[in-house]
Amino acid sequence: MNRLRLDFGGGSLVALIFLAGAVWWHPAVAVAATAPQPRQEVTPHDSDSPPGQTDVYVVKPGDTLFAISNQFGITVDRLAAANNIDDPAVIEVGQRLIIPPAAEPEQYLHHRVQPGETLHALALRYGLAILELAEPNHLIRVDGLFPGQGVTIQDHTDEPAVLRGQSHTVSRTDTLVALAARHGLHPWALATANNQESPFIAWINSHLWLPGEEGEYLDWPSPFSGVRMHPIPPDQGQTLSIQISLTLPVSITGSFMGAQLPFFQQPGGAGALVGIDALAQTGTHTLVVTATVGDGGYTRYTQQVPIVASEYSTETIVVSEQVAAIMTPETVQSETALLEQLFAPHSLLQMWDGCFALPAHGDVTSAFGTRRSYNIPDASAYHTGTDFGLSVGTPVHAPADGVVVLSEPLTVRGNAIIIDHGWGVLTGYWHLSASHVIAGDSVVQGQHIGDIGNTGLSTGPHLHWEMRIGGVPVDGLQWISEQFP
């Protein structure tokens, strides 16, 4: 196969694909390819031509291009292209049609994109030109891949070996010859490995594969050496973990879905936890992570991250006139503002370890994210926690280590406790009959912190357990089965 080799230094991949398509899809290409072969005038019933030989069929009354293609085992598009037919519905009796050989069965591999994989990295791994990968997958942006995306790799049935080595971002002073010498590589071998026509050309800000034994090659811009995310893709209402590996000690900042992300230092890198709102817009969103060095220089890594829709049920909550009378808009708004203030701080210390435990063991009477309406004006919303139906006095336990930041009665949420677990992870416990901790107490996983009750805006004894990440309510049950960060 003749492969197109193109290097992108900021040019438009859309235009290149369009131009390439004008060559690849023109019907004349198929005619030119089949014209030199011997032809025989046949019908579908008397053709005994050897496999691979081109036939000629004479159109008879009642024939259609669709019927002819079916009888010869080829597609309508292929038959039309071989005969320069613009409208497949229009053929004439007596018309002579070239019947191209049946195509070989299509072979392809379905690849699932991982964080850090780019068109450039995938093309190198599968030995393809970028356009050979982009065109069949209808990719029009060089940076358009996102984790979890399925990509079809044509003419492959097995995964090739993982590329070993490291990524290098070309600077203004770099040359392939100098890079090859620095890393003990032959200049022409380095150029060939990167589909470069010459070792004397290097596009500024492009990424090069430096073959070696350091680890799996992905298209990371220095000082990034890896990005791990889970789950991929995240659903509405879930927690997304982002873990950055670095080769240098730098300052990390980031943003996602219009909000700034607080990154916390970890050995060899930094991490962040993102709360995906239960009403978040689905589709792909751009994650931006910036690494800043001491002299003010910076490197920016961007990644498209998809958000998947969750299926939430709906319910109507009917409260008594006595309870509804005290749930004024002013009361609700005042309590909401207090909670937003308490859920906002980000402790630099991660206090939990491993998966969270359930705060109480009982039937889930109302799941997180359930769309709710009340018989109270301006109180329609979605359920920001998980309700466990249990009798008054049943113990409530801390699901993980942390520090109590609130333990007091509230109007809407009744007797309430809030625990800070660090890194912007806080949990709340509403409608309690009693609290056994005070603000400032340190608690450990499994500690008895309160008892289930029926206080505040409640229609029966239960525990409302709430988790927020960076102030955003998320499904706490995800943390029971998945370990973060």
Image (cartoon, rainbow, N blue to C red):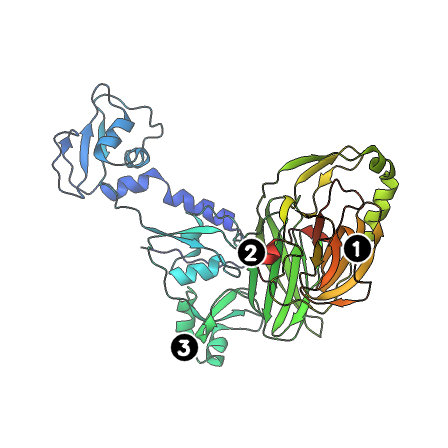
Q: What residue is disc 2 on?
A: 231
The residue at the far top in this view is 61
Q: Which quarter of the figure has residue 71? A: top left
How many dots with numbers?
3
Q: Position of residue 408 (x, y in %)?
A: 84, 55
Instruction: Of the two numbered discs 1 and 2 on the same chain, state the one appearing first in sequence.
Output: 2
Coordinates of residue 233 in the picture (x, y in percent): 55, 52
Mark 2–mark 3 Cα distance, whole angstroms, equals 41 Å
Q: Is residue 156 visible?
A: yes
Q: Amino acid at mark 2?
A: Pro
For residue 314, which quarter of the picture? top right
Asked if residue 233 lies left or right of residue 190, the reply is right
Of labels 3 and 1, the one closer to you: 1
Q: Are marks 3 and 1 in contact (CB under 8 Å)?
A: no
In front: label 2 or label 3: 2
Which comes sooner in the sequence, label 3 or label 1?
Answer: 3
Task: Identify residue for label 1.
Answer: 434
Q: Does residue 426 appear to the left or right of 303 in the view shown?
A: right
- Image position of 446 (left or right of 330): left
Element class at badge 2: loop
Query: CA gap, disc 1 to disc 2?
Result: 36 Å
Q: Position of residue 474 (x, y in %)?
A: 66, 51
Amino acid tagged 1:
Ala
For the point 61% across and 50% down, the residue is: 285
Reading the image, the residue beneath label 3 is 186
At 79% from the left and 47% from the top, the residue drawn is: 413
Q: Is residue 469 visible?
A: no
Of 148 and 479, nearer the camera is 479
